[in-house]
Image: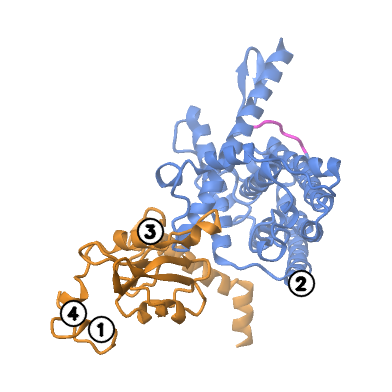
Amino acid sequence: MAVADLVKTFTFYEILVGMKATMTVFIQRIILRNRKAVTLQYPHEKRDLPGTYRGMIALLKYDDGTEKCVGCDLCEAACPSRVITVISAEVEGEPMKRYAKEYYMDMTRCLFCGLCVDACPVDALAMTKEYEWARYNKRDLRLDKPQLLALGDRNFPEREKKLEFQHPNVAYFNIGHKNLPSKVS
Amino acid sequence: MEMLVFAGAATAKIAIVMVTVLITVAVLTLAERKILSWMQDRMGPMEVGPYGILQPIADGIKLFFKEDIIPAGANWLLFSLAPILSLVPAFIGFAVIPYGPNQEIELFGVTIKPFIITDINIGILYILAFASIGAYGVILGGWASNNKYSLLGGLRAAAQVISYELNVGLAIIGVLILSGSLSMVTIAEKQAGGFWHWNLFGGLQIISFVVYVISSVAETNRLPFDLPEADSELVAGWMTEYSGMRFAFFFMAEYANMILVSCIASVLFLGGYNAPYPGTLLPEHLAWVEGIAWFTVKVYFFLFLFFWIRATLPRLRYDQLMRFGWKVMLPLALANIVVTSIVVYVLR
């Protein structure tokens, strides 16, 4: 046993095993060509993101172009990092309806947990697959309502119908409940 | 007139060798990154040119136009001197390497050896002497930067280069005993006539060959012996404060040293320009082509070995490096000298 170990030490056996491993990969890569690089050429090639990917958050619109958000502030309450600021107001001439007059998201603090998306009673918020949002000025990451709506328009070209047309059998003020029947598209 | 022709021919030879070495350095920077990435399931540089083949040019332009920073607390003179002190010895060693057969041509009545710049009768000693001066560049650069990481890198380089240069010197003594000469040209000539005449196989200098290869990896500060540079511990070791062309000088010196030790290894152990079979395949007047081709193949084999080892092995710890150098390599090299001397004495 000791002799075998000595022989292994003097012939650099372990090192040769390692060099064989690297050479095997090299030959497979260059001569046999049956091995591919595991890396991607990032700006040119991009990963396929899973459907549940949580990227930048967007505000959505209905198919007639009106905003979904009703200014209820639940997202602001749900947010653990105080990313969201909603300034709610009445719709002009319609005292029963409210909307978000101003809506800010400070994405520098966002941890992309998705609680605001869960909290929204009217599905006005959604998570996109956008992630290339490096900016030279961090104030550029404090998004206002037009920017968030633009994000939604860009990533979700198919818009939903208004609530009263989605669920004909459900009164639309109950829509926020989680155990909904699946939406009629 | 004769003097002029002689000087002109020498200048031409020097210029060709310098340009070849510089081009090889540029090729090596790309080859290293590509070979490493192929061995590690990556792609390496892919952006500049097709498959990144123009990357060395882009790197060169970038380094040339970068700001040349001298730190406020640095010793200006030594800081500027260190890269030059590192680069010049790396290039100067190429003067005594035989690149091809030791044949002569007549040019305007002057005898010129076209494949040998100069045949100093102490060629190998000359290379070792200048390699030692190259270590000063590293040490002074580390000290003059006024940076603790640079200083640590410089100190490590000092200890490492000195202890491993000793092993290089002792490893080649076996070859010198067999050849009976310090001239690189004579050593190469004595190994002509097939691979069983090479010092590695015919002279049975296997131990000294292994000791030489390992020590030369350590001497050029390459992985797994890159402790003076040690990216993960010392930022970039003695090069931490260097930028622009000064950094490029260190970089070129490292690669030129790699080429130089590969040239020495192929001349001393693998017969230099001699083919592994007796005689030549090509006709007599084209034998030099074959010689240079074999020399190139051998040198590139060693360069590939450098990259291969780098792709395989992690960095040694400092005490392991020192123990390996002094307690393993040095006794082996000494034992090789004793055994070779006895065998040569008995057989001759």
Q: What residue lies at 69% left-to-right and 45% top-to-bottom?
A: B243
Q: Amino acid at mark 1?
A: Phe
- In-front residue for pair B51/B178: B51
Task: Give me the C-alpha separation between circle 4 and circle 2.
Answer: 69 Å
Residue placed under numbered mark 4 in the picture = A183
Residue placed under numbered mark 2 in the picture = B319
Q: Amino acid at mark 4?
A: Lys
Q: Is residue B108 magenta?
A: no
* Mark 1 and mark 3 on one chain: yes
For disc 1, the neighbor class at 10 Å (few under 14, some 14 to 19, many from 20) is few
- The disc at residue A173 is 1
- In-front residue for pair A140/B80: A140
The magenta stretch spans which residues? B115-121
For disc 3, the neighbor class at 10 Å (few under 14, some 14 to 19, many from 20) is few
Quadrant location of the N terminus of chain B in the rendered image: top right
- In-front residue for pair B318/A141: A141
